[in-house]
Amino acid sequence: MPQAKFYTKERNFDRGPDNRENVSQLSPYLRHRLLTEKEVWQKTLEHHSFETVEKFLQEVVWRTYWKGWLERRPLVWDEWVDAVGRSEDSKELEKAREGKTGIGAFDTWARELVATNYLHNHARMWFASIWIFTLRLPWEAGAAFFLEHLLDGDPASNTLGWRWVAGLQTRGKHYVARAENIRRYTEGRLDPQGQLDEEAEPLAAGDPPEKIEAELPPTVASDPPRSGDGLFLTTDDLAPETLFESGAFDSVAGGRPEIESLSPLREARAVRDFRAAVVRSALSHTEDRNGKSGEWMDQTSGRAVVEWAETTRLKRVWFAHAPVGSTRRPLKQIAEALEASGIEVRRYARQWDHDLHPFAKSGFFAFRKKAFPLLKVS
């Protein structure tokens, strides 16, 4: 983690994969809530004044904002998945994914993404802009390429970030990559002078996305664990120790239900291995009432979870809330299988989300204006 003042001043510089001292690199851990936003927020303010770290804290809550926004507009995710399923490969798409477009900066980032499963945030914006406005490729395919390879790939942040670059998220406002900006913030390492369309217009936007009233499940405090309860962990929330006392459940298990139904989305082997590893790590630190570590489940279908619950004689199974994204549908199917077998399902959400999601109705700065005072900063 860089020093606070250094982060604010230096965060936009992309110095390449061998020099990330100016960014925190916490995103894969926040994505899976191995670290929670609340923990990072509180720990940061224990050591720094808010004024010193405001920019860093703002970046932490962007993830919360995107999730809250998408909860109200789940059709945006569904339509994107449908578009990815309908898209056809082309030579141009293949060149872009392989880093063979002839645009040196873009090709460098494409190869870096595949090799390291990470890109600097500024590079992600440049890359998406060049993909959309210079290469004229479908933004949906670019978002799929990112989600396939990023260790911190988040359904809300990724999908809505690409929409924002394209000019679809904030109508009429788009992000155009400029060679001079790239040269400056890569300190001359990359310079696509004369290779970019710097006069591109935003993509044509259709009707505003349909909005629904989103309601989160209750917090843990409203109905604590009791005898006969089990906990099932997924990649959406892997810090149960911040919510539950050790030994709170009769049995603990975890797995990756989204793997069962990822199509038409793809997932790089490194991403798959990382997500399996972080679930296993969380399970190894989560004990049941008998002091036994949580159980990893290779198969995470409804039938497999029902067998686990029946074998351990559970009356109720707990799941963390599945935000809009790849885990929601398979977890719904698992819950239906449990309930059909007479086992109650208890979904829960964190107080952080209950407090902040209601403010994610429109733009980020309206969200920030209401959310930051609630978090006891000015």
Image (cartoon, rainbow, N blue to C red):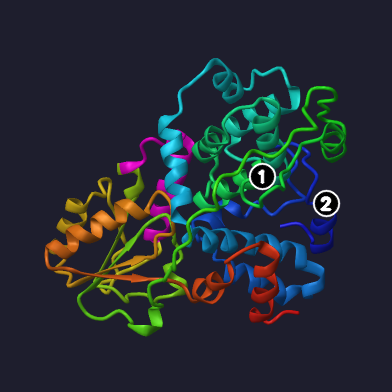
> Is residue 151 placed above or below 145 in the rendered structure?
below
In the rendered image, the quadrant that contains the N terminus is bottom right
Q: Can residue 152 be seen in the rendering of this structure? A: no
| Residue at 44% across, 68% down | 213
**Label ID, residue 167:** 1
Judged left or right of residue 341, residue 65 is right
Eye-nearest disc, 2 or 1: 1
Tell me the element at label 2: helix
Q: Is residue 276 magenta?
A: yes
Q: Which residues are magenta?
A: 261-284
Quarter of the image for residue 349 reads: bottom left
Mark 2 belongs to which amino acid?
Glu
Q: Is residue 171 magenta?
A: no
Q: Can residue 294 be seen in the rendering of this structure? A: yes
| Residue at 50% across, 61% down | 33
Identify the residue under disc 2: 10
Q: Residues within 10 Å of mark 2 (few under 14, many from 20)?
A: some
The front one of 82 and 8 is: 82
Judged left or right of residue 109, residue 94 is left
Judged left or right of residue 185, residue 104 is left
**Label ID, residue 104:** none
